[in-house]
Image (cartoon, helix red, strand yellow):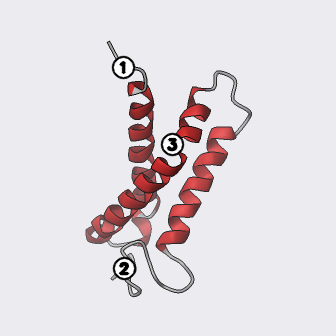
Amino acid sequence: LQKKGDGDELLRQAAEAACTHYLVIAHLDRVPPADTAKLAEPWRAEVSGTVAALGGVLVAALRDSKPSEGAVQALLHTMLTGVLQRSFPADGAGAAGNAAWSPLA
């Protein structure tokens, strides 16, 4: 038997894994294969923090039996856009906490 909330945690973990995989796969053509791990680690941390912050909203959207059209997609878009903006801000400081961080460094 599952405890109440176990299913919610499973949804959060699945969302974290899916978002991290999406970011890495979407950028495979932009970086050399050996550099994908450099992207995955900081993104994993960013995605984890984002899911923790928005987990309740995300789980509610995923559990909604009649979600508004595009509600989950819009939430995921917002989450992923935020991760990318924090990873590649205009001032050059990235998710790795290093002003010189670059997915190609």
Q: Residue at x 28, y 65 (%)?
A: 37
Residue 93 at x, y percent in the picture? 46, 82
At 69% from the left edge and 23% from the top edge, which residue is drawn? Answer: 66
Left or right, 40 with respect to 91, comes to: left
Q: Amino acid at mark 3?
A: Gly
Residue 81 location, quadrant: bottom right
Q: How many marks?
A: 3
Label 1: which secondary element: loop
- The residue under label 1 is 3
Sequence-wise, the earlier of marks 1 and 2 is 1
Which mark is on residue 55? 3
Q: CA distance from mark 1 to mark 2?
A: 44 Å
Q: Is residue 69 left or right of residue 72?
A: right
Task: Establish if 6 lies above or below 94.
Answer: above
Q: Quadrant of the C terminus?
A: bottom left
Q: Are marks 1 and 3 in contact (CB under 8 Å)?
A: no
Name which residue lies at 70% across and 39% down: 70
**Helix, strand or loop under label 3:** helix
Q: Identify the secondary structure beneath mark 2.
A: loop
Categorize mark 2 by other alpha carbons within 10 Å: few (<14), some (14-19), many (20+): few
At x 40% / y 80%, what residue is drawn? 102
- Depth check, mark 3 against mark 2: the one in front is 3
Q: Residues within 10 Å of mark 3 (few under 14, many from 20)?
A: many
Badge 3 or badge 2: first in the primary sequence: 3
From the top left corner, tell me how far across and down residue 76 is, in percent.
Answer: 58, 48
Q: Which residue matches tag 2?
A: 104
